[in-house]
Amino acid sequence: MRTTGPGQSAFLIIDAIVVLNREKVDYAVIGAMAGSVHGAIRASVDADAVIALTVQQSADLERKFQAAGFKTELRRGDMDDPIPAVLSLKDDYENRVDLLVGLRGMESQAFSRTLEVAFQNEKLRIIGREDFIAMKVFAGGPVDLMDASRVISAAGVSLDVELLRRLTRKFGREAAESLGRLLAD
Amino acid sequence: MFSLEVTSGRVLAKLSAMQSKLGKQVEEAMIEDARRLTPEQRLEAFAEHSRLMMELYLAGQRLRAKQGGGSG
């Protein structure tokens, strides 16, 4: 693995992506790393991605990560949880990557809307801007809404508002109303 | 759950639409991980992670400039 100390979750996710690519698992980097790409930079310590797998398939993937030297933990959500499962990956330095095994409301086409970004001599697939904003609005915490607001500002006139509204509606009425308030500000 | 927060002079209505027990568990595990680092290690980790996040931010900025997007 390429990590050499703490604070290198961004390197650990690159190592994770090598495994995902080898296993032909679609993924999109989300969270603070995606926020940085889209213009919302802030303090964070972890790295997150969403992967296109079922919960059943994620158990097999967990074994692949263990074989590659990662420490792993697979947590399953209950029936009501919008996150079906999370596969957490760690190294010896407390660096951490959380792979969300799907997200309720997120459409599968989000994986084809990803942005390819060169980083540390690798190519990362970053969740698309409108998908990112929609997910942040759905998450709904104060930091999430701030991230969404900053990315909206950074996008300027290039923001696809129609796409954004459509994606956010899939996350529910509350998310759609929250987006309306952000866009009005 | 509904609450109001004042941020940068604007009122942002906070609606916790996504009540994820699993998300909370993951967050608690992350806090537990951080406890295993010394304060100095946490500071170093923050500095290193911030450096890498800045790299991604600048990459995104270059992409937006090529696409003729907004500021930032």
Image (cartoon, coloured by chain):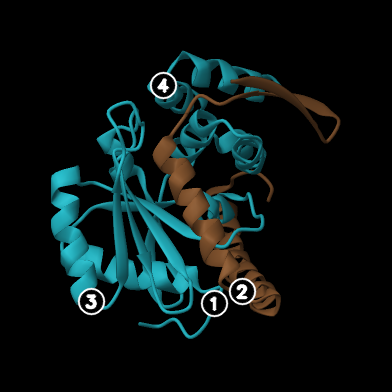
Q: Residues within 10 Å of mark 3 (few under 14, many from 20)?
A: few
In the picture, measured across the screen, residue A125 lies left or right of residue B39, that is: left
Q: Residue B61 appears in which quarter of the rendering?
A: bottom right
Asked whether disc 1 touches disc 2, contact meaning CB atoms under 8 Å apart, the reply is: yes
Tell me which chain appears cyan. Answer: A
Dot 3 falls on a residue whose secondary structure is loop
Question: Which residue is at a point 48% across and 32% down the rendered structure image?
Answer: A134
Q: Residues within 10 Å of mark 4 (few under 14, many from 20)?
A: some
From the image, tell me which residue sits under label 2. B45
For badge 1, the amino acid type reads Pro
B28 and A151: which is toward the camera: B28
For badge 3, the amino acid type reads Ala
Tell me which chain appears brown. Answer: B
Q: Residues within 10 Å of mark 1 (few under 14, many from 20)?
A: many
Question: Which residue is at a point 63% across and 66% down the rendered structure image?
Answer: B54
* Chain at numbered mark 4: A
Dot 2 falls on a residue whose secondary structure is helix
Q: Earlier in the sequence, mark 3 or mark 4?
A: 3
